[in-house]
Image (spheres, grey):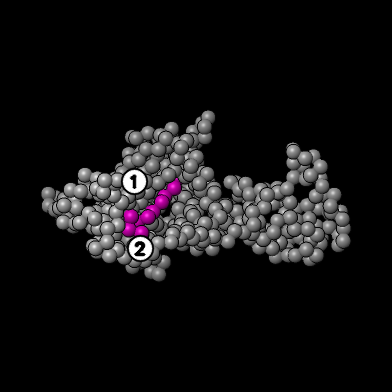
Amino acid sequence: MAEIVRMPKLSDTMTEGVVAKWHKKVGDKVSEGDLLADIETDKATMEFESFVDGTLLHIGIPEGGTSPVDAILAIFGEKGEDFSVLLKEEPTAPADDEKKEEVKIEKPVVPIVAETQTEIPNIVETPKNTPVVTTSSNGRIMVSPLAKKLAAEKNINLSMVNGTGDGGRIIKRDVENYGGGAVANFVGVEKFTEVPVSQMRKVIAQRLGESKFSAPHFYLTMDIDMDNAIVARKSINNAIDPNKVSFNDLIIKAVASALKDNPTVNSSWLEDKIRYNEHVNIGVAVAVEDGLLVPVVRFADGKTLSQISGEVKDYAVRARDKKLQPEDWEGSTFTISNLGMFGIEQFTAIINPPDACILAVGGTKQVPVVKDGKVVPGNVMKVTLSCDHRVVDGVAGSQFLQSFKNYMENPVVLLGAQNI
């Protein structure tokens, strides 16, 4: 008997999916466990394996097509079997009970480049002795007072200026643009490119829009002296080469330790209750081609720097290859967004729900600082904590930043031998 396979829900936020590629075609014999199709979700492209045996009788969504979760993906059965009754049994559209409801399928859209060109001569030549302006009925040149004054200052003969105001009246810009007879005009072409919004970008827009406009954000910024952290990182990398650790790895470890000291910040707003997490799972924002993914370093407070470093590097590679799985990006209790490597000194980040806070990390910059009453060169990193005021108050956020600052400025406290 023919059997329907529907578009699966492959992540907690997935509402629709795109069939990136079919690995089987109509008429192929398929066994349970065979790779059927690659499906693009809001966060990754995932391989979808068949869970039925039979012949592929019908493909409901073509390659590149978009359909909601539970739409007909494919129909399997015996070769030559009539499956039309299954299609007829699909819910009908309210406007016509005898027509089956069609699943909206967005065919792949080729980027469109539109051009609009205004026909303008390259050079407009005006003989120097030929009047070109419009005059009034009594023969007087029509000119605004400001344009007349400006022409006098520049010693310009108004009879040689082309007026572009109402009725040919000379205005200020005509005098300013007067070139003495020959005016070169730039011929421009208006262009734009339109591309369809990816599933990932749709979800980013939805979730961050909901966060920004529902969670009352406030921001706390602090300077971190990075001199000791720079020395500590160099010593660590000399000791554990070639497993290099980055400043981002140090930041993750310091954040994890500060969250254990300040559990109020390691929390979530759940509408009718607040969840205070005893475990520390840190989401690390990773930029990919279509947007942003936030894989999670679980139990970061109990991991060594080397473990954190290896895990983050692995996540970065798999995120860019769209190989992350749902369990890789779910369950964060706090998020870090680091743009320091791009030369950004300071910024504010939008909270990644359901987390109550996110830390925006800028780059380290060498600046004059005062130490022991003397102005000396120093290395300073700015961080900004975005807080959901429904959960975290200013004092709690400030105490967290003080703890984080202490760990970063005194890495010996943060990094015992067991943490390297």
Upstream in sequence: badge 2 or badge 1: 1
Q: In x, y percent, where is residue 102? A: 73, 48
Identified at 64% across, 54% down, the residue is 106
**How many circles with numbers are drawn on the protein?**
2
The percent position of residue 306, horizontal first and vertical second, equals 42, 61
Q: Amino acid at mark 1?
A: Asp
Q: Is residue 338 magenta?
A: yes
Drawn side of residue 89 relative to residue 229, left or right? right
**What quarter of the picture does the C terminus occupy?**
bottom left
Q: Which residue is mark 1?
A: 166
Q: Is residue 260 left or right of residue 157?
A: right
The residue lying at 44 percent from left, 59 percent from top is: 118
The amino acid type, in three-letter code, at marker 2 is Phe
Q: Residues within 10 Å of mark 1 (few under 14, many from 20)?
A: few
Disc 1 is placed on an element classified as helix
Image side of residue 370 versus residue 262, left or right: left
From the viewer's perspective, is 276 left or right of 417? Answer: right
Q: Residues within 10 Å of mark 2 (few under 14, many from 20)?
A: few
Image quadrant where residue 385 sits:
top left
Question: On residue 186, which mark appears?
Answer: 2
Secondary structure under the numbered disc 2 in the rendered image: loop
Could you tell me if residue 318 is visible in this image? no
> Do the numbered discs 2 and 1 sit on residues whose CB atoms are within 8 Å?
no
Q: CA distance from mark 2 to mark 1?
A: 24 Å
Q: Which image quarter is the N terminus in?
A: bottom right
